[in-house]
């Protein structure tokens, strides 16, 4: 993939971090959360993708004996390779896991509902969230989410779906930083090089839906939210069209409700 020099230069700076220090801080935070919440461990969804694989590795360091992974494919849309990657990683980390095909649960619900691809995809994400909390309740555990900062800032997650969690271990890291952390954690290349695919419907790809690569997105987000630059100055600095940067800013504004608790009507 070719990206322009200003983007590449800033991307190199964004990803040039002390990943050993970051790993230790996240693992320490995960341990502290268990102590303060008086819970036994963590439950999380393991998809076979980058984010969940990084979270799996961090959780294995924080609570190796009390972390439980749920692999939740929908058979006709989830690539078999993703399921294989997920289960292979769990075995490698010596992490207990269960594979639950959610096809029947999802299909049975959709039979009673008017057809809508987006709503149906979000329903699938919420079914997975409900299953995570079922096991968390059963095991007296917390649910660890797998969203990264890139996705959170633009609202690229399902409200009360993959956005439903008790703790977000990698939510301070952009996707490109998560990939570098994955390299530090020695994750397999087939996971590190895999494109982000939420798979809420067939051939569902993140970058296609977002409209740009994470290598473009992350420098834009860094300029807008870390450096507090305007849309105009961000576009100028990165040599990008104003409209492209403004589109990302609007995604953040329109998805604000996803990052907030429900409003309470005051009396």
Image: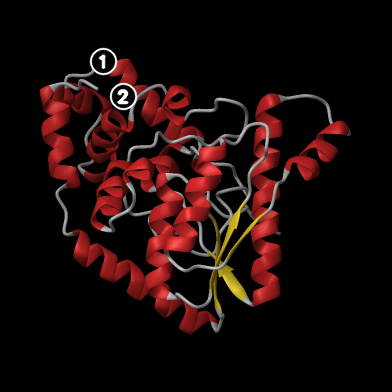
- Residue 66 visible in rendering: yes
| Horizontal and vertical percent position of residue 43 | 57, 65
Q: CA distance from mark 2 to mark 1?
A: 7 Å
Left or right, 180 with reference to 77: left
Q: Nearer the viewer, residue 37 or 242?
A: 37
Local crowd size for mark 2, using a 10 Å CA cut-off: few (<14), some (14–19), many (≥20): many
Whether residue 265 is visible to the viewer of this picture, yes or no, is no
| Mark 1 residue crowding within 10 angstroms, few (<14) / some (14–19) / many (20+) | few
Residues at badges 2 and 1 in contact (C-beta under 8 Å)?
Answer: yes
Q: Quadrant of the C terminus?
A: bottom right
On screen, residue 37 versus residue 176, left or right, reads: right
Quarter placement of the N terminus? top left
Residue at position x 70%, y 47% in the image:
101
Seen in the picture, residue 212 relative to 58 is either above or below; the reply is above
- Coloring applied to the structure: secondary structure
User: Relative to 99, does residue 68 appear above or below in the rendering?
Assistant: below
Q: Position of residue 191 (x, y in %)?
A: 38, 44
Q: Can you identify the residue that label 2 sits on?
A: 245
Q: Residue at x 27, y 27 (%)?
A: 231
Q: Between 195 and 173, which is closer to the camera in this rendering? A: 195
The residue located at (38%, 55%) in the rendering is 54
Q: Give coordinates of residue 212: x percent, y percent.
A: 36, 23
Q: Where 60 sits versus 76, above or below?
A: below
SS under mark 1 = loop
Residue underneath mark 1: 241
Mark 2: secondary structure? helix
Residue 48, label in figure: none
Q: Position of residue 37 (x, y in %)?
A: 53, 80
Residue drawn at x 14%, y 39% is 12
Asked which quadrant contains residue 28, the reply is bottom left
């Amino acid at each position: 993939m070719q990206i322009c020099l200003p983007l590449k230069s800033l991307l190199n700076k964004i990803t040039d971090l002390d990943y050993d220090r970051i790993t230790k801080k996240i693992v320490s935070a995960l341990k502290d959360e268990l102590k303060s919440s008086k819970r036994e461990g963590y439950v999380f969804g393991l998809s076979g993708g980058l984010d969940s694989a990084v979270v799996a590795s961090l959780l294995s360091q924080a609570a190796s004996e009390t972390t439980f992974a749920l692999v939740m494919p929908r058979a006709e849309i989830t690539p078999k390779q993703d399921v294989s990657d997920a289960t292979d990683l769990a075995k490698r980390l010596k992490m207990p896991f269960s594979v639950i095909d959610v096809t029947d649960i999802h299909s049975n619900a959709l039979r009673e509902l008017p057809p809508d691809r987006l709503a149906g995809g979000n329903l699938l994400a919420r079914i997975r969230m409900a299953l995570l909390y079922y096991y968390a309740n059963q095991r007296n555990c917390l649910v660890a989410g797998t969203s990264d900062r890139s996705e959170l800032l633009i609202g690229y997650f399902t409200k009360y779906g993959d956005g439903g969690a008790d703790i977000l271990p990698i939510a301070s890291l952009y996707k490109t930083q998560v990939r570098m952390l994955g390299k530090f954690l020695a994750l397999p290349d087939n996971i590190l090089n895999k494109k982000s695919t939420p798979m809420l419907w067939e051939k569902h790809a993140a970058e296609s839906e977002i409209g740009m690569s994470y290598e473009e997105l992350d420098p834009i987000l860094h300029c807008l939210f870390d450096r507090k630059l305007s849309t105009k100055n961000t576009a100028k600095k990165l040599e990008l069209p104003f409209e492209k940067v403004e589109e990302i800013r609007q995604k953040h504004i329109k998805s604000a409700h996803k990052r907030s608790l429900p409003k309470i009507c005051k009396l």
